[in-house]
């Protein structure tokens, strides 16, 4: 394993990739399983034909049908031509749909006349673009996928038919990145990350006995927090307006904190300290964050609590099943699932077919009325 390694699992329900630098997981990428590309939604950088569905003069914007469930938003100040409802245009996705907001697009002025509508993503190409220029080797769990990637990237491709996310620590890193709280190394402090559509608020806490003027303790925790925050921004793919509430720090320490954050997150913009002591900045938001991708608001919850989406939870369960089947080549594996999850498995029967093709008919799905709608359990019988 080199200092810069990529790993990718072409699962039956989802494709997962990670970049690992010096044994530390730095970034994730998630996409549809090979064969499910037609179920994907438009992503950043894609160009295709759309159609104007509505023009809002008050917002100085047009809403564009781009083939997804939500219309895309086009700022009319970016357009030099006359637009009208129903007009076909060519657009490029600048920002993927986030939460209840549709994708942000820009007009392609000199687009080819034969540009087509939105089409399904090419998983292999997307994976290669994620890794390009970032790694020296890529470890792939499927032999056919390794062959495809080898044809597109000039880096060493290694086929390793193991549970790569578990083997290289990406599974644990993904679980940690799904938590609201980060415990800092060395103890004594933590970081709490609260994402919202308008702002991400990050709070640095001290959890160790110390006097109110314990500057040394504050400095140690602040420096560790700055490193953790910089890494979390990339790992969780957090973008937009961000405000960090560090522990009280003199100007010299503030300068260190700024330098650390810019080192770990060089893409941040407009970074400054407010009069109230907050450190605020903008990180370009080009696609959905991990929280936005994997969770949704709990209906009716007054505090905005979130839960894993049914689709994310189902794909997680399928990944766990594949891990169990790989680890025990002769075992039978069953997923026991709540009603909602069980129905989602039935709706996506192609996942089961792919698993059977890879591992044989050593799997089963069972509905368990004792589990909540989105809960599941893996039972392995040797």
Image (cartoon, rainbow, N blue to C red):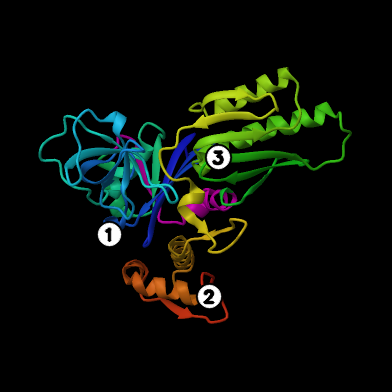
Q: Looking at the image, which residue is at 70% across and 27% down?
A: 277
Q: Is residue 3 left or right of residue 134?
A: right
Q: Answer whether residue 173 is magenta in the image.
A: yes
Tell me the residue at 62%/56% (across/down): 303
Q: Is residue 44 visible?
A: yes
Q: Which region is colored magenta?
A: 153-176
Q: Around disc 3, counting alpha carbons within 10 Å, would you say few (fewer than 14), some (14 to 19), or many (20 or more)?
A: some
Query: Quick one: label 2, few (<14), some, or many (20+) residues within 10 Å?
Result: some
For disc 3, the marked residue is 199
- Distance of label 1 from label 2 (alpha carbons): 27 Å
> Which residue sits furthest front?
58
Residue 120 colored magenta? no
Mark 1 highlights which residue?
35
Q: Is residue 61 above or below residue 180?
A: above
Pick the residue in front: 304 or 120: 304
Residue at the spot of label 2: 379
| Outermost top residue | 252
Relative vertical location of residue 351 with respect to residue 167 in this rendering, above or below: below
Real-space Cα distance between discs 3 and 1?
36 Å
Q: Residue 223 versus residue 379: which sits nearer the camera? A: 223
Q: Position of residue 279 (x, y in %)?
A: 63, 28
């Amino acid at each position: 394993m080199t200092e810069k390694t990529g790993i990718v699992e072409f699962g039956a329900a989802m494709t997962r990739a990670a970049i690992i630098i010096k044994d530390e997981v730095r970034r994730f990428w998630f996409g549809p399983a090979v064969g499910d590309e037609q179920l994907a939604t438009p992503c950043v950088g894609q160009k295709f034909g759309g159609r104007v569905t509505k023009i809002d003069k008050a917002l100085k914007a047009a809403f564009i049908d781009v083939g997804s469930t939500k219309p895309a938003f086009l700022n009319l100040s970016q357009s030099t031509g006359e637009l009208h409802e129903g007009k076909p245009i060519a657009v490029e996705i600048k920002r993927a749909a986030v939460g209840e907001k549709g994708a942000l697009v820009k007009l392609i002025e000199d687009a080819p006349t034969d540009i087509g509508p939105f089409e399904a993503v090419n998983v292999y190409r997307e994976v290669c673009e994620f890794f390009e220029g970032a790694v020296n080797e890529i470890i792939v769990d499927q032999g056919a996928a390794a062959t495809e990637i080898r044809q597109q990237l000039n880096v060493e491709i290694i086929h390793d038919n193991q549970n790569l996310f578990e083997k290289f620590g990406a599974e644990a890193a993904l679980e940690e990145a799904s938590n609201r709280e980060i415990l800092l190394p060395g103890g004594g402090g933590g970081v709490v990350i609260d994402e919202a559509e308008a702002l991400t608020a990050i709070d640095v806490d001290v959890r160790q006995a110390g006097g109110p003027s314990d500057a040394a303790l504050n400095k140690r925790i602040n420096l560790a927090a700055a490193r953790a925050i910089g890494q979390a921004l990339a790992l969780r793919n957090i973008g937009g307006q961000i405000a960090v509430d560090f522990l009280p720090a003199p100007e010299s320490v503030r300068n260190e904190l700024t330098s650390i954050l810019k080192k770990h997150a060089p893409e941040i913009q407009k970074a400054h300290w407010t009069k109230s002591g907050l450190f605020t900045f903008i990180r370009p938001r080009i696609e959905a964050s991990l929280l936005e991708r994997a969770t949704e608001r709990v209906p009716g919850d007054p505090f905005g609590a979130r839960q894993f989406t049914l689709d994310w939870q189902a794909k997680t369960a399928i990944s766990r099943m594949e891990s169990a089947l790989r680890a025990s080549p002769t075992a039978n594996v069953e997923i026991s699932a709540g009603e909602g999850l069980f129905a989602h498995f039935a709706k996506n029967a192609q996942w089961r077919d792919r698993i059977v093709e890879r591992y044989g008919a050593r799997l089963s799905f069972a509905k368990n009325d004792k589990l909540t709608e989105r809960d599941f359990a893996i039972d392995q019988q040797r």
